[in-house]
Amino acid sequence: MKSLLFILLGTCMMFAQNNRFIYEVKYKKDSTSKDITRENYYLDITKEDIAYYNRLNYINDSIFNATGHYGFKGNRLTSFLIKKKDDNIYQNYEYIGDVNFYKLSEETKQHWNITDSIKVSSNFQLQKATTQFGGRNWIAWFTKDIPMPYGPYKFNGLPGLIMELYDTKKNYYFNVIKSEKIPDDYQRNSLNNYISRAIPVTQKDLNKLRLDLYSNPFKYAFNGSLTIPEGKKLLLDDGTVLSKEQLKPAEANERKKLKAFNNPIELDKAVKYPQ
């Protein structure tokens, strides 16, 4: 397994300056449901910054590089994170379902308890650490064989890469499934596009925006922020296709979907929607 997953990296003395670790992420959007969402997220560690983003953005970049155009069937917008190497501030680029990205800046640290528990996985020696973060209790397995103090999402500060991470209630589970060297000329075109037009907000602002969107789920289509040409339809994130005439009748179902996402990674930031 180690030779398959890390053949491009070799030993820790041979790491390139730009490395990508791909995490399989399994999580429950709705804490009351047994449904599990599975997605792959990319953690790019370069000499300049850290970026954590959904695989969909990587696919979008690949298509753009090949065709000069963004977008593909099944594409959807997703939130992502950027942190400069010489800065402790994470830039959270949040997508909440309207036409905008919002930029939230915050310093994120975890206070880790590193235990003596050791296990071997894919020929790597992993060590157990625990922390409390975002209203959840977390268990991380990191390896000093890869001396990079990062992990998925905002998790950082351990003396090695986090290979496996989960909360004690198993609502979220992250696991490294692959690694690769990032080409020196690789550009995050789609992320850079979103960064350039992101609107700075505070957490209070963001919560209010979510509540406003809940009250009026398609306000961006009715207030002129998003134009739906005559005869065209709107593709929602879940694959639903609606004409402008169908938006008003669909608002109740959209509110139901927004309320069902009650289980974010940082549980203490969950929005309390009206009953």
Image: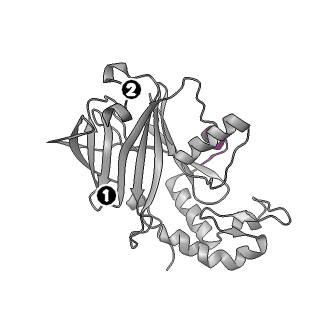
Q: Name the disc covering residue 9, or none.
A: 2
Please give the range of residues in magenta: 192-200
**Towards the viewer: 186 or 150:** 186
Q: What kind of element bears circle 2?
A: loop
Task: Classify the position of the N terminus by image quarter.
Answer: top left
Is residue 15 toward the left or the right of residue 256 in the image? left
Residue 197 visible? yes
Is residue 104 toward the left or the right of residue 16 in the image? right
Residue 195 visible? no
Q: Is residue 179 above or below residue 28?
A: above
**Rendered residue at 42%/35% (across/down):** 179
Q: Residues within 10 Å of mark 2 (few under 14, many from 20)?
A: some
**Rendered residue at 31%/48% (across/down):** 165
Which residue is most to the top?
A: 13
Give the image location of residue 148, x and y in percent: 34, 30
Q: Is residue 36 above or below residue 127?
A: below
Q: What kind of element bears circle 1?
A: strand
Q: Amino acid at mark 2?
A: Leu
Q: Is residue 208 above or below residue 252?
A: above
**Towards the viewer: 8 or 85:** 8
Is residue 30 covered in magenta? no
Is residue 199 covered in magenta? yes
Is residue 170 toward the left or the right of residue 107 in the image? left
Q: Name the disc covering residue 136, or none.
A: 1
Give the image location of residue 208, x and y in percent: 56, 63
Q: Amino acid at mark 1?
A: Arg
Give the image location of residue 59, x and y in percent: 59, 43
Give the image location of residue 84, x and y in percent: 48, 32
**Which-is-in-front pick, marks 1 and 2?**
2
Q: Residues within 10 Å of mark 1 (few under 14, many from 20)?
A: some
CB-based contact (under 8 Å), mark 1 and mark 2:
no
**Rendered residue at 61%/78% (across/down):** 252
